[in-house]
Amino acid sequence: MSGALTMLAINLGVLMAAILLLWAYAVKIRDVSFIDAFWAFGMVILAWASWFQIDGNGRRADVLLALTTIWGVRLAAHLVTRWRREGEDPRYKKIMGHAMETKGWSWAKTALLMVFLTQAPLLFITSLPAQLGIWASEGGRWVMGPVAWAGVAVAMIGILFEAVGDAQLKAFRANPANKGKVLDTGLWRYTRHPNYFGDACTWWGIWLVAAETGPAGWVSIIGPIFLTFTLTKWSGKPLLERGLKKSRPGYAEYVERTSGFFPLPPKSK
């Protein structure tokens, strides 16, 4: 595993260099909101960094790289476009303002410690299945079996589910008549967070592709476990819904009838 540790150390160095450059840019424009887009694209960078460090890539390494790239580039492009259209995210503005007020930090220090250096390890841990799966596939070892191909199917379902959910929400918000209303059609009829469910599906699928490689793949299960916990119990669903319940009339009723994560038929009243 010493080779894996060396690869991960190099990847961490690459990630930290990118994080510090982005922090410097955030200080210049006084907005950290674009970090959400880097959450996705940073995992693409780590997958490519892993791929370039191995000799003889093989099918599994190429599949892991492709899945991570397709997911990350699409999501990053979507989030950058949204950020450019809507401007600073109120969530980050609130986080930054609260920390600056209570700790007495400067804007630059708050951005570094509360946003950028917080995101880096979370991003790194989540993407472990791609990083370790690619490393363990060096030289084309471990022919892809049924578990890996099932993982490809799960990941593709996740990517498609998230893309469709994002497109439906974008179209809903683009209609002025929907201002203040709750989206409860399409995929949003079956889960309150099709984008989060799609994220989790994608990374559980990527982990299944990596899992056939043995101990390195098995250990990387920490990635999808951590992501699922983050989305459902920590900074994803709970934080978002807390604000929506206050700002959107009818959201509480939507919560009562609609699954919070896994797509399920809506409950009848």
Image (cartoon, rainbow, N blue to C red):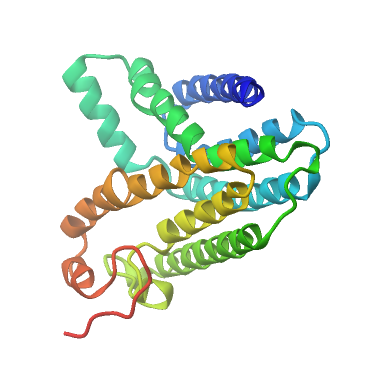
Q: State the image quarter where residue 255 is shown.
A: bottom left
Query: Is 264 situated left or right of 48 in this image?
Result: left
- Residue at horizontal 63%, vertical 41%? 133
Please provide percent x and percent y for residue 259.
Answer: 29, 69
- Residue at horizontal 58%, vertical 51%? 206
Depth order, front residue of 161/149: 149
Q: State the image quarter where residue 174 is shown.
A: bottom left
Above or below residue 122? Residue 81 is: below
Depth order, front residue of 106/220: 220
Above or below residue 121? Residue 6 is: above
- Residue at horizontal 50%, vertical 61%? 162
Above or below residue 219? Residue 78 is: below
Depth order, front residue of 62/107: 62
Depth order, front residue of 191/104: 191
Residue 40 in view, yes or no: no
Please provide percent x and percent y for residue 262.
Answer: 36, 67
Q: Residue furthest right?
A: 56
- Residue at horizontal 56%, vertical 21%? 21
Query: Is 96 situated left or right of 37 in this image?
Result: left
Q: State the image quarter where residue 147 is shown.
A: bottom right
Can you say which quadrant of the picture contains the C terminus? Answer: bottom left
Query: Is 170 situated left or right of 45 in this image?
Result: left
Please provide percent x and percent y for residue 199.
Answer: 48, 54
